[in-house]
Amino acid sequence: MGKTILCEKVMGFENIVEVSGADFEEDTDFWRLAAAKAGLAYEGQFSSEKTITDTSDKYSKRETYSLTKDKIIDFYKDENLVLVIDDFHYAPESKRMQIAQQLKDAIRRGFKAIVVSLPHRADEAIRRNADLSGQLCLINMESWEVDALKEIAKVGFQKLGIQIKDEVAAQIAVESLSSPQLMQYICLNICTILEMLGSESGQVGFEILETAYHYTTANFEYGDVVSFMLKGPNTRGKSRNMFLAHNGQGYDIYELIVKSIAENPPIMKLEFEDVKERIYRLIQEDGKKPSAQTIKESLAKLQELLDGREDIFKMLDWKEGVLYIQDPLFLFYLRWGVGIKNV
């Protein structure tokens, strides 16, 4: 949604020291990282040379130094620097608590920091440390609406001399899932396809959209993520319950979860009842269906599996009865990636 770009525009690129939640591990020293990102040597050695007056002999002495938290805070204040912690949710859970504790004292002393996180985790720093409640200001950035995304297509194609109807632009905007970058990427691929086809109509119609969607996913690196989700946790030799879908194929609970996320309409936030209803719609009416408890437990296990992998795998967030899809590009890939819809 351009949160980091907003920070750069408001404060100036030269005043920002940016770190990512992914930079933190369980044993990462907060102030060591803050110093390193600002170009400060947190610790080191230096040599000093002295002369003995009576003999004129010289000797050198090697000493070590280590910056204190106070000196790092003073440096940030003197240089008018702001620490921007992007993707705060990527830091380990216990580390997020420690970061909040470190910020509490630092902010009181004039240290400036911005914590950037997903909308549904925006208050996490405060919830981790209630004492921060009077020292933080929450700024909620709303997602792009369909009408705003449509303008990307309408204005862009108009400049190229290509016609596009409002309803066609609206459908592309819906598939863009509030992402202006994805909207631009789809439009770029529509132009590429029109050029490849040698189209002389000068118009974007519904018939080209599905091809453009598939074409757009060609460079998305989510294949391993989807395969991992479909596989689910290790069964340890036990066979999973299979559920018969309308297409005649049998799917286990993890395959049903993945397929349900990709169903219409494309939504980045699904209440549990929405997930359950989508799963039940995939299964034959008279067929056996997983219980609500089974679906909830499977979502929790899937979340645990993804959290244990690299950042690119952390595409889902099952939290307080709501399933959040973290990245619009991932959901778009689930819907239109080559071979995905036939799983």
Image (cartoon, helix red, strand yellow):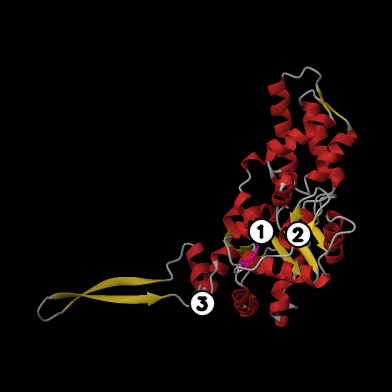
Height in image: 337 above or below 119?
A: above
Q: Point out the tag, 1 or 3, that comes first from the N-terminus.
A: 3
Label 1: how many residues lie within 10 Å, few (<14), some (14-19) or many (20+)?
Answer: some
Tell me the CA gap for discs 2 and 3. 47 Å
Labels 1, 3: front one: 1
Look at the picture and state if 243 lies above or below 193: below
Left or right position of 287 against 222: right
Q: Which residues are drawn in magenta?
A: 229-235
Amino acid tagged 3: Lys
Q: Position of residue 210 (x, y in %)?
A: 77, 36
Give the labeled residue for mark 2: 257
For residue 126, what is the image quadrant?
A: bottom right
What residue occupies the far left of the structure in this picture? 55
Asked if disc 1 and disc 2 are in contact, CB closer than 8 Å, the reply is: yes
Residue at point 76%, 19% (across, down): 199
Viewer-nearest residue: 14 or 88: 88
Residue 194 visible, this orientation: yes
